[in-house]
Image (cartoon, rainbow, N blue to C red):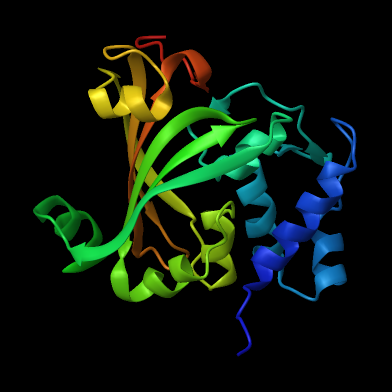
């Protein structure tokens, strides 16, 4: 069976490979050059680059072009990338330990968020260099994603597997709050019960705007951080 790969995903993956071999601030092809190289429209080329901008891998300078961004120590709050990609950018080796993978009826909140009656749940401890960093519970529409989870490698990137299946995680919304580690958190993350956690709950949509993933990630506070970009609003000036 031939797997459909969106053209902008093909461009995005090609650019990721080039970025890995380039120094910070090195120039990348212009939108026009990408159009010519990949035989796509300017909108498709720009969309592929914009996804890399959102991840913090590249930056644009109006009138000058697109350049490789310096590596960040933490994730920027306005950007979502796969845990595997994030850890590799930090020079760490990502891995996962599956705690649970099953299909079940959706809860009320899952039905509201995802618009389905049946879901598949993937709970994993996410590790970096063998150290537990997060306990992640990801919930997906069963009919869409169950085949993807069945073929997911033990240490594979779920975002990449979804994109390869034509379900590209594209945008969404999230909430962040501090919580104390439960007994289960303490056991799975190797922290003390009551230790501070950064808890992120997010809804991610695919390239068509349809709900794709409802996830709770419970990060060990001492091992993970977020950077925040913001603008200052001054009223009356």
110 to the left or right of 132: left
**In the rendering, at what x and y percent does residue 86 appear?**
62, 37
Residue 234 or residue 159, whichever sits in front: 159
Residue 42 or residue 213, whichever sits in front: 213
**In the rendering, at what x and y percent does residue 45 appear?**
71, 62
Residue 23 lies in what quarter of the image? top right
The residue most toward the left is: 108
Inspect this view and state whether residue 116 appears. Answer: no
Residue 191 lies in what quarter of the image? top left
Inspect this view and state whether residue 184 appears. Answer: yes
Residue beneath the point at 64% across and 43% down: 85
122 to the left or right of 104: right
From the image, which quarter does the C terminus lie in? Answer: top left
**In the rendering, at what x and y percent does residue 148 appear?**
47, 70
From the image, which quarter does the N terminus lie in? Answer: bottom right
Residue beneath the point at 71% across and 58% down: 12
**In the rendering, at what x and y percent does residue 105 appear?**
15, 65
Residue beneath the point at 45% across and 51% down: 171
The residue most toward the front is: 187
């Amino acid at each position: 069976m031939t797997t459909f790969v969106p053209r902008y995903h093909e461009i995005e993956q090609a650019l990721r490979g080039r970025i890995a071999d380039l120094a910070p601030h090195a120039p990348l092809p212009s939108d026009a050059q990408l159009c010519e190289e990949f035989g796509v429209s300017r909108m498709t080329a720009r969309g592929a680059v914009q996804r890399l901008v959102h991840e913090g891998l590249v930056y644009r300078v109006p009138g000058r072009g697109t350049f490789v961004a310096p590596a960040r120590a933490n994730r920027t709050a306005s950007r979502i990338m796969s845990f595997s990609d994030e850890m590799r950018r930090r020079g760490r080796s990502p891995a996962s330990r599956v705690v649970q993978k099953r299909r079940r009826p959706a809860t009320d909140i899952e039905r509201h968020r995802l618009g389905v009656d049946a879901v598949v749940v993937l709970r994993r401890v996410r590790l970096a260099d063998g150290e537990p960093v997060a306990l992640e519970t990801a919930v997906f529409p069963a009919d869409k994603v169950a085949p993807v989870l069945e073929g997911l490698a033990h240490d594979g990137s779920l975002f990449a597997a979804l994109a390869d299946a034509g379900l590209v995680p594209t945008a969404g919304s999230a909430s962040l709050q501090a919580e104390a580690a439960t007994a289960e958190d303490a056991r799975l993350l190797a922290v003390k019960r009551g230790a501070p956690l950064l808890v992120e709950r997010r809804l991610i949509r695919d390239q068509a705007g349809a709900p794709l993933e409802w996830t709770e990630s419970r990060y060990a506070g001492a091992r993970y951080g977020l950077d925040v970009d913001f603008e200052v609003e001054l009223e009356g000036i």
